Image (cartoon, rainbow, N blue to C red):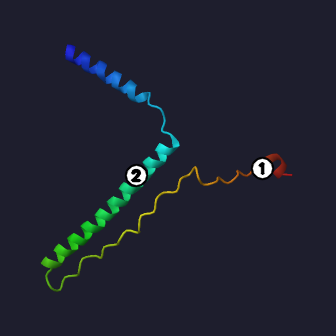
Amino acid sequence: MKKIIAFVFCAFAGTSVFATLPPLSPEAQEAANLAKAKTAYGDKVAAYQLCQAQNRVADKFRVSGTPAPAACVAPPPFVPPVAAASAPAAPAAPAADPATAAK
């Protein structure tokens, strides 16, 4: 029983610690977005390399008269994401008043 109470107490204490973390600074958020984009690009490159390896193996064991495996599509070169804060935002258009628009 004591172990269960200790576990529940630690779970609630750990949850409250994570709930009080401050938001990321803009620089840290930009770095996190760049890391996420690099990871996604790395996944695309790995999938392309896997496709090429599978095609090489399939070519070795392919019986004559069967179609060749599908061609692999190479990923485009890596382009870092554009920071939203550095791009100037377009001014919002004023909303038209429906009462004056109907006249």
Tag 1, which secondary structure?
loop
Which mark sits nearer the N-terminus, 2 or 1? 2
Q: Is residue 55 visible?
A: yes
Q: Nearer the viewer, residue 38 or 5?
A: 38
Q: Nearer the viewer, residue 42 or 12?
A: 42
Total number of numbered discs in the rendering: 2
| Percent coordinates x, y for residue 72 in the rendering | 31, 73
The residue most toward the right is 103
**Is 20 placed above or below 100 here?**
above
| Percent coordinates x, y for residue 52 in the rendering | 25, 72
Quarter of the rendering containing residue 59? bottom left
**Is 87 placed above or below 23 here?**
below
Q: Which class describes the residues within 10 Å of circle 2: few (<14), some (14-19), or many (20+)?
A: few
Question: How far is the residue under mark 2 from the one under mark 1?
Answer: 40 Å
The residue most toward the front is 27
Of tags 2 and 1, the one toward the viewer is 2
| Percent coordinates x, y for residue 57 in the rendering | 16, 73
User: Horizontally, is 1 left or right of 31 in the view?
Assistant: left
**Which residue is at a point 33% across and 59% down the rendered structure image?**
42
| Percent coordinates x, y for residue 86 in the rendering | 58, 52
Circles 2 and 1: CB distance less than 8 Å?
no
User: Horizontally, is 17 left or right of 85 in the view?
Assistant: left
Numbered mark located on residue 86 in the image = none
**Which residue is at a point 64% across and 52% down the rendered structure image?**
89
**Which residue is at a point 34% across and 72% down the rendered structure image?**
73
User: Horizontally, is 60 left or right of 15 in the view?
Assistant: left
**Residue type at the position of mark 2:** Lys
For label 2, the residue is 36
For label 1, the residue is 96
Tag 2, which secondary structure?
helix
Quarter of the rendering containing residue 5? top left
